[in-house]
Amino acid sequence: MHKLNTRVFSALSFSIFTSVTGVGIVVPLLPVYARNMGATGLYIGMIFGAFSLSRTVFIPWFGRTSDRRGRKPFIVCGLLIYALISVAYIFSRNVETLIVIRFVQGIASAMMMPVAQAYVGDLAPEGSEGLTMGLYNISLFIGMSFGPLIGGYINDHFSLRGAFAAMGIMSVIGFFLSLFFLPPTRTERMTGHEKQPASWLELIIDRHMAALFLFRFGYASGIGVIWGFLPVFADTEFALSSSAIGLLVVLGVLISGLLHGPMGYMADRVNKRFMVLTGGAVTACAIYSYDLAHGFWGLFFANTFYGFGGGISMPALTAMAVIKGNKAGAMGSVMGLLMMAHSLGMLVGAVLGGLIMDTVSLRYAFVMGAGLIAFNAVAFMRLSREDRFA
């Protein structure tokens, strides 16, 4: 049993923290920005969906290749592309350009995020998978939380271009942290594996892997609805400021992130499957409550409960994924599949939400999100029965 390499873990966590903070600065502003360009609900869904589509296509290849060639090169390159993307946002002039930019940004995310998670999975000591992933996710989620708050403040007091510039600066910081403080690829733990990684077929037909995939898909579909349409909902229905919208978006993410540490610790000691199902039930009820909201405080409490649900379920789910990745000798492939599920979920949630907004009512997009989460939680429950890794 190996010990956690705290130096590498800290370097990786800080690198991802800075880059995710930068991305979070602009994400809540994009729906309103696009709507000011004349985008319909479907186009807003396509802007968010383009990111998820490209991630979905490229994640499996990057994850699998990182199992063979190492993690660091993909993380460093992804961070560099994130920095360049911020410049492209500044010069965008129409909705079609935003869709292309988000597509390229999705490729960069596919290079970086699942590979970074696989890197942390490689570092996790046996029996502490939940705590290790939970601590890493704290840095990830806190970065996602600070970003929207900073972006809302910059937009209200300076300009949207200033928010894009801030994203670029944060991404550059993450790039240099990874470049100089992550050790050379040849020293990574996965490069010493003699075991041949499990094939794609073995992973795809594994029912426990399918359970993890489906739950992550359902959870991410809710995020796709919230991130894509909560800003528009809060703006058009209640005329909330950019700062207030940023606070709402950040709330669920922050609560979820703060819970990842203690819930990760708990996941190493109690039944992980039960924690996943409990969190799934909470998130389904939470996103349904958006339809019942009649102002800022209704949205506030809905986001709070969504954060609680994610904070309960995600540490246990990722701990199960680390155990699966170690047993299969394919941590990058397993994390790639989970991130693929996340991207597909956000794509489906965003596009279906846009269609419902255009044809029925924006409020019903949240009802649809609740249904997707509930359906996939039931699928997880059935597929994960007698799960050895729970």
Image (tube, grey):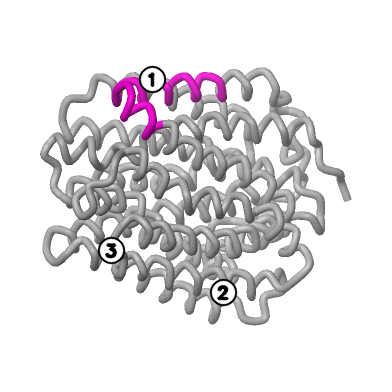
Q: Residue at x 46, y 30 (%)?
A: 22
Residue 345 visible here: no
Crowd band around label 1 with a 10 angstrom C-alpha radius: few (<14), some (14–19), many (20+): some
Magenta stretch, residue numbers: 151-174
| 309 in relation to 251, above or below | below
Label of residue 53 in the image: none
What is the distance, in whole Å, between disc 1 and disc 3 at their CAs?
A: 35 Å
Q: Secondary structure at mark 3?
A: loop
Is 65 rendered above or below residue 299?
above
Instruction: State left or right for residue 215 relative to residue 321.
Output: left
Residue beneath disc 1: 165
State which tag comes first along the sequence, 2 or 1: 1
Of the image marks 1 and 3, the number of the one nearer the N terminus: 1
203 sits left or right of 360 in the view: right
What amino acid type is highlighted by mark number 1? Answer: Ala
Callout 2: SS: helix
In whole angstroms, how far apart are the C-alphas of marks 2 and 1? 40 Å
Q: Say which of marks 3 and 2 sits in front.
A: 3
Please give the residue where the numbered disc 2 appears in the rendered image: 277
The label on residue 294 is 3
Image position of 267 (left or right of 204):
right
Quadrant of res 189: top right
Q: Amino acid at mark 2?
A: Leu
Based on the picture, tell me whether residue 164 belongs to the magenta stretch: yes
Q: Amino acid at mark 3?
A: His
Q: CA distance from mark 3 to mark 2?
A: 29 Å
Q: Secondary structure at mark 1?
A: helix
Q: Nearer the viewer, residue 29 or 52?
A: 29
Measured as percent of width and height from the top left, residue 237 is found at: 20, 55
Q: Residue 131: where, in percent of width, then height? A: 74, 53
